[in-house]
């Protein structure tokens, strides 16, 4: 069947099978491979995108359900001025390692900060609790979101942090020489 | 905002170079690879754990309009590919021809125009199975009446794979005979799965014109895969190119070669098109390399005042249906015999018996450092069992028995030569960070109120960086790593490595090693990896070996470049090479600091018409192969604090203190990230994750609904500390850290939970300590966690 879906501001018209999952529509039909697939059972969250402004797990949404709706993916996160503060935060705080869960985490983080500009650590943990990360042990993801909170106002329009040094502070590290 | 100039030239905290693409969704994982005309493969798997295949009817699948090929074991047998060698000198069925031997085993492979049609066609294949009794309980695998699983192996009459031992049996038995105290404990390290978020898969593309096979694949060891493909398929090795692009986590799951890869290659040969195969999550959990599954009986001999004298272990190792463990060939139980741990013992001995069962093959995976996870868990649990019996504080008992700094280098009773360490300092730091006496005081107060608070301690010694070529090989391939460093005329460099990152940040840390050695900014060093056509040979990334082996190769090759630069500089400055002195980034004339040349100056000159001394070829490029003289021995002290809900048995990890000593840290930010991830793994294994089976051999952990991963809610804020004891034999003193936390943390969590349950007289319970298991343990009935709860 034919669907019209707006993804990251661009409208796409495609003929799809009714059973096609949104994650496969994005990846295979639109070549937006930033959104990943990981489990089929809505547990891992690497496929999180926004559907009309709300995070959804695109492995359990049919593409036809997005007909006439707006989808936002990680590819639509950075603006003309550069990376979104949450993207910068993930880089600054080493909030990613293999990068596979990162797009989903970024989309949830952005959604959280749009609703609550100053979430607590507990609120951040709860917001990402439906998404798994096997590399980071979550702490640096939480720090990354907090970094974005603290830099959100100062970073508009955002600029690229690519040549920055890592923050020197390690709050609980006690080096012994 | 800091500037480019403030970035470290060499070691130190530095943001990752690879992040830019991942943050934008521009990483290239295997499933992101799209080739013109690409077809899609899907695997038909056995629903039964043990059954004879009577017939396979693929006619309906063949007739599906979008199906291009259906491959069965019979097809592969015609190509002599129905069986493939494992990494442990066994064979594994690529597609079953005679029997299926575990639930989820590969039976047929469909190639179709799209992934949905390939799946549809699987439903059209009709397999007639004759069920056989499955062997599920490893403890029954050697019973006389048990069916023989591997009747494909000639002369096989039972399910035993190997008997293996290490240490001195007689000396150990002698210590046990006259010991004041002997305690024994059965301990299971249950089967778990690494479960990287990206499942395994590949895109195989055989070019029918050139005869060149390119395989984009989820591998941690691209060069080893290339050689194995050459050996298995008989393809000329120079016509095989393995590309391991961005990898979405590995943890040992992506070391082996899986049947789906081989089927995809055959599918591409048969159809003349590229074939993509990506397993789904259930396939990943049911069929690819599991970890652990060690049934251990530990015994510890000690004096009454808590001096540990000897340790004895018997292990029943469940290897599943094929012996597919990926480990150095001489060591069928991996490095398990480092189980003497961090303590000064008189003697030690272990016996390991490996058995076949009707379960998925594998056994060495999940950040285990070749079974050191099992070894550390065993000794650290046993020390706590001893503390329980002697009514001693477990931290104090450890402190009394830890190796002392002056004992290094130390050869342990089973033959490992520990390179360096200061163990008491590290444990003391962990106790200081934790506020250990205050925690014990708090625990006493809470116990009076009936609250269950536990404090768990573990101290681990790792042995990583496999390994010295004379001792270690995989399928005859020695475990040395190559490195190539090219310096362009303008002083920018390209480093080519055999190992492959799955998130460890190699593009940054290895550039930092070159930066440290040559004094050029890390941004000026491009790290190329994960492509066998572009990189020198080496065994890959697992067993925490990248920094100890490839990292050492990087330092050595950079030093070679530096020495070449010295010769060119001497020609430029018209002085003898011996009159030059090095400071980071430049050679200068001794005593005349103003007269010097930077690496960039020298690189340009090395490519110019400058007349060079006799024997100096020009250019600065160098290569090397690094054969490690010994393993490196990272260590650490972990303390975990838990609260247990007495009504439900639910465990909450309140604090986790981790002091790691991995020698010199190249990029502390990345090291800490590695530790964080491993600690989360430890919580997962200790409390949540298990691949259990019911009596019919049904896998009970075949989805993320059943195989529970720790989330942000289960993980506390990690509290890290560090000590630095450089490795004396590693060029930069680094030891490797990728697996330390996964190795060391499960014991700390379990010890904490058991400590919390002390008021119930509990001495041991097996992982995972789920609410049901904890509650049942409190009632005096701990669960057997490898089987279905009945």
Image (spheres, helix red, strand yellow):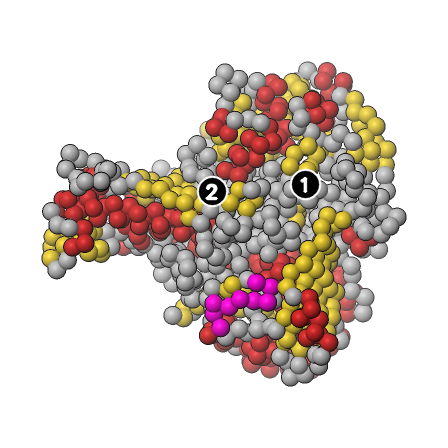
Q: Residue furthest right?
A: B145
Task: Describe the element under mark 2 as helix, strand or loop.
Answer: loop
Name the spot of residue B384 as percent of width and height, x first. 66, 72
Tell me which corner region of the image, top left, top right, bottom left or bottom right, holds residue B507.
top left
Contact (Cβ within 8 Å) of mark 1 with mark 2: no
Compared across the picture, whether B525 is left or right of B457 comes to left
Compared across the picture, whether B737 is left or right of B644 comes to left
Q: Is residue B426 magenta?
A: no
Residue B473 visible (yes or no): yes
Tell me which corner region of the image, top left, top right, bottom left or bottom right, holds residue B523.
top left
Name the spot of residue B336 as percent of width and height, x first. 62, 58
Which image quadrant: the C terminus of chain B?
Answer: bottom right
Name the spot of residue B414 as percent of width and height, x first. 60, 64
Residue B716 visible (yes or no): no
Q: Which residue is mark 2?
A: B538
Front residue of B379 and B746? B379
Q: Main secondary structure of the magenta part?
A: loop
Label 1 and label 2: CA atoms lie apart by 23 Å
Q: Which residues are magenta?
A: B407-415
Q: Residues within 10 Å of mark 2 (few under 14, many from 20)?
A: many
Q: Which residue is mark 1?
A: B90
At x 70%, y 74%, the residue is B174
At x 26%, y 48%, the residue is B563
Front residue of B657 and A69? B657
At x 76%, y 18%, the residue is B59
Q: Earlier in the sequence, mark 1 or mark 2?
A: 1
């Amino acid at each position: 069947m034919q669907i019209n879906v707006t993804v990251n501001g661009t409208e796409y018209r495609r003929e799809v099978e009714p059973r096609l999952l949104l994650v496969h529509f994005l990846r295979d039909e639109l070549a937006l491979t930033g959104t990943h697939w990981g489990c089929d059972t809505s547990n891992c969250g690497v496929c999180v995108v926004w559907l009309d402004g709300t995070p959804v797990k695109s492995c359990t949404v049919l593409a036809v359900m997005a007909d006439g709706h707006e989808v936002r993916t990680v590819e639509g996160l950075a603006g003309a001025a550069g990376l979104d503060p949450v993207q910068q935060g993930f880089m600054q705080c080493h909030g990613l390692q293999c990068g596979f869960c990162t797009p989903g985490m970024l989309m949830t983080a952005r959604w959280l900060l749009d609703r609550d500009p100053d979430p607590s650590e507990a609120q951040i943990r709860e917001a990402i609790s439906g998404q798994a990360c096997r590399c980071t042990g979550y702490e640096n993801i939480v720090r990354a979101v907090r970094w974005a909170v603290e830099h959100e106002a100062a970073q508009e329009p955002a600029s690229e942090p690519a040549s920055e040094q890592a923050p020197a502070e390690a709050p609980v590290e006690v080096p012994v020489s | 905002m800091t500037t480019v100039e403030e970035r470290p030239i060499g070691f130190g905290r530095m943001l990752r170079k690879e992040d830019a693409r991942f943050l934008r969704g521009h990483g290239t994982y295997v499933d992101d690879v799209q080739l013109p005309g690409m077809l899609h493969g899907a695997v038909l798997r056995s629903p039964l754990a043990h059954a004879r295949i009577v017939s396979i009817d693929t006619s309906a699948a063949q007739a599906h309009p979008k199906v291009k090929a259906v491959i069965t074991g019979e097809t592969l047998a015609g190509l002599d590919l129905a069986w493939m060698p494992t990494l442990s000198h066994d064979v594994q069925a690529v597609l079953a021809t005679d029997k299926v031997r575990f639930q989820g085993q590969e039976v047929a492979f469909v190639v179709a125009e799209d992934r949905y049609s390939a799946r549809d066609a699987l439903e059209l294949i009709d397999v007639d199975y004759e069920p056989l009794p499955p062997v599920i309980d490893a403890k029954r695998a050697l019973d006389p009446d048990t069916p023989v699983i591997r009747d494909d192996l000639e002369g096989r009459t039972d399910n035993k794979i190997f008997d293996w031992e290490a240490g001195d049996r007689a000396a150990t038995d002698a210590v046990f005979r006259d010991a004041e105290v002997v305690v024994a404990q059965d301990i299971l390290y249950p089967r778990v799965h690494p479960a990287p978020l990206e499942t395994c898969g590949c895109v195989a593309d055989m070019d029918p014109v050139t005869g060149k096979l390119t395989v984009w694949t989820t591998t941690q060891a691209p060069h080893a895969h290339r050689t194995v493909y050459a050996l298995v398929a008989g393809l000329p090795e120079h016509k095989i190119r393995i590309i391991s692009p961005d990898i979405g986590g590995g943890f040992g799951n992506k070391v082996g070669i899986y049947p789906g890869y081989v089927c995809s290659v055959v599918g591409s040969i048969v159809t003349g098109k590229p074939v993509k195969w990506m397993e789904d999550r259930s396939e990943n959990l049911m069929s690819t390399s599991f970890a652990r599954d060690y049934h251990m009986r530990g015994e510890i001999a000690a004096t009454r005042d808590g001096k540990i004298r000897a340790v004895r272990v018997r292990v029943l190792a469940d290897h599943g249906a094929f012996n597919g463990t990926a480990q150095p060939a001489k060591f069928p139980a991996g490095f398990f015999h480092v189980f003497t741990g961090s303590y000064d013992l008189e003697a030690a001995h272990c016996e390991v018996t490996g058995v076949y069962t009707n379960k998925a093959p594998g056994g060495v995976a999940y950040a285990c450092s070749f079974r050191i996870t099992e070894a550390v868990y065993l000794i650290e649990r046993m020390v706590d069992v001893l503390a329980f019996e002697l009514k001693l504080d477990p931290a104090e008992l450890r402190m009394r028995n830890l190796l002392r700094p002056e004992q290094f280098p130390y050869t342990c009773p089973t033959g490992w030569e520990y390179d360096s360490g200061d163990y008491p300092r590290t444990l003391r730091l962990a106790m200081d960070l934790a506020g250990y006496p205050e925690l014990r005081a708090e625990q006493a107060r809470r116990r009076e109120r009936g609250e269950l608070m536990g404090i768990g301690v573990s101290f681990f010694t790792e042995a990583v960086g496999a390994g010295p070529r004379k001792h270690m090989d995989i399928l005859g391939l020695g475990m040395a790593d190559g490195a190539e460093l090219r310096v362009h005329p303008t002083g920018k460099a390209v480093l080519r490595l055999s190992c492959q990152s799955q998130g460890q940040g190699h593009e940054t840390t290895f550039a930092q090693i070159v930066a440290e050695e040559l004094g050029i900014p890390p941004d000026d060093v491009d790290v190329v990896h994960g492509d066998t056509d572009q990189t020198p040979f080496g065994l890959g990334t697992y067993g925490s070996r990248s920094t100890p082996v490839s990292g050492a190769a990087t330092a050595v090759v950079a030093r070679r470049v530096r020495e070449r630069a010295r010769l060119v500089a001497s020609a430029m400055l018209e002085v003898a090479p011996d009159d030059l002195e090095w400071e980071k980034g430049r050679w200068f004339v001794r005593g005349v600091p103003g007269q010097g040349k930077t690496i960039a100056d020298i690189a340009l000159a090395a490519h110019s018409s400058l007349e060079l001394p006799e024997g100096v070829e020009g250019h600065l490029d160098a290569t090397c192969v690094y054969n490690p003289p010994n393993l490196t021995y990272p260590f650490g002290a972990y303390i975990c604090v838990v609260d247990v809900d007495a009504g439900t048995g639910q465990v909450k990890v309140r604090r986790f203190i981790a002091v790691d000593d991995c020698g010199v840290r190249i990029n502390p930010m990345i090291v800490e990230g590695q530790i964080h991830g491993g600690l989360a793994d430890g919580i997962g294994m200790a409390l949540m994750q298990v691949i259990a089976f019911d009596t019919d051999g049904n896998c009970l952990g075949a989805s993320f609904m059943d195989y529970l991963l720790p989330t942000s809610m289960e993980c506390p804020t990690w509290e890290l500390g560090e000590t630095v004891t450089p490795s004396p034999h590693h060029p930069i003193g680094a030891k490797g850290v990728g697996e330390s936390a996964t190795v060391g943390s499960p014991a700390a969590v379990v010890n904490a939970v058991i400590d919390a349950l002390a008021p119930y007289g509990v001495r041991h319970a097996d992982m995972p300590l789920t609410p049901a298991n904890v509650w049942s343990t409190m009632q005096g009935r701990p669960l057997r966690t490898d089987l279905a709860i009945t």
